[in-house]
Image (cartoon, grey):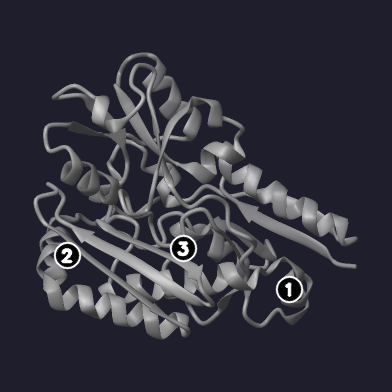
Amino acid sequence: MAHLRIGSRGSQLALWQANYIADQLRAEGHAVHIEIIKTTGDKITDVALAKVGTKGMFTKEIEEAMLDYRIDLAVHSLKDLPTELAPEFVIAAVPEREDPRDTFLSSKYSRIEDLPPGARIGTSSLRRQAQLHSMRRDLEIIPLRGNVDTRLRKLQSGEFDAIILAAAGVSRLGLMDLVRMRLDPEQMCPAAGQGALAVEARSNDAATIAALNFLDHAPTRAAVECERAALNALGGGCQVPIGAYASHQNGKLTLQAVVASPDGKEVIRERRSGSDPQKLGKEVGEALLAQGARRILESVYGSVTSVPQQP
């Protein structure tokens, strides 16, 4: 059996995810070591994600460690992984997905509808901001960065009336008792790949890829490939207001996707079904562009600033 080195970010959630994969591999008889790697996204914590214009901000340094043979594989939140990988890398496994939805957390209010005018909601996501504004234009959306514990402390200290977090992360950390409401994809469309993990390896490392094969969950892989194909057709990343969620219904994939202006005044939606994940995702992305998404996204891309070079 192999000795496998996993690269991971150092946050509590990232380490939970890395340890989850490590435990699965150990159960198969492999020796596993986790190497913590600090990424660009971890270094820039005082800027809203929507203002950070680099793809791979949570993955670049980890991929560099793979190329240097310091690690053999990496565990990512799939939504953080760029839609186009360099040819040196491959998504070797996509385990079964957790709940893909977003959640509403508040110390005082049970639902978004209950929030008073001008209530302060914390989120790091332009996608969530845009969809929140489409529901309630009177809300004040405040950028919120940091790990889950940091965000929860800010909520509990009264800095925010509510915050929005991915259900998967809250669940993995055992904090679901703080959730007041789970937001259905029709209400708030999740990020492409939300709730899923990606296990990345070097494309020339056949032994590691073979060792990871048992982790792959075909229905989840098909769904996230569909979502990522839509995101790729739209030219988007995690810093733009795009949602995409695919589910298996009646033997086919159904993909719903949304592009919204940051102020929530314009929301473009598309929903289609098909059997080919890549084709369906591309068709939905192109349909959104044809309906006016291109104009929204060009406006957003024009306002995204580049990240300074890291020392």
Picture residue at 42% right of the left edge, 75% below the top: 84
Are the two marked residues, 1 and 3, in contact with CB atoms closer than 8 angstroms? no
Are the two marked residues, 1 and 2, in contact with CB atoms closer than 8 angstroms? no
Q: Can you give x and y, in whole percent of width and height, for residue 133 in the image?
A: 17, 42
Residue neighbourhood size for the residue with mark 1, other residues' Cα within 10 Å, grouped as few (<14), some (14–19), many (≥20): few
Q: How far apart in space, not on screen, are marks 1 and 2 (Cα)? A: 37 Å
Q: Which residue is mark 2?
A: 297
Name the residue type under label 1. Asn
Q: Quadrant of residue 129?
A: top left
Picture residue at 66% right of the left edge, 83% below the top: 204
Q: Can you give x and y, in whole percent of width and height, for residue 216 in the image?
A: 67, 69
- Residue furthest to the top in view is 157
| Left/right of residue 2 with respect to residue 192 in the rendered view | right
Q: Toward the viewer: 46 or 292?
A: 292
Q: Looking at the picture, does residue 146 appear above or below residue 202? A: above
- Which structural element holds mark 2? helix
Picture residue at 66% right of the left edge, 50% below the top: 18
Are the two marked residues, 3 and 2, in contact with CB atoms closer than 8 angstroms? no
Q: Is residue 9 visible?
A: yes
Q: Can you give x and y, in whole percent of width and height, for residue 171 in the image?
A: 57, 39
Q: Between disc 1 and disc 3, whose residue precedes?
A: 3
Name the residue type under label 2. Leu
Q: Which residue is mark 1?
A: 213
| Left/right of residue 39 with respect to residue 73 in the rendered view | left
Q: Return the mark for residue 68.
A: none
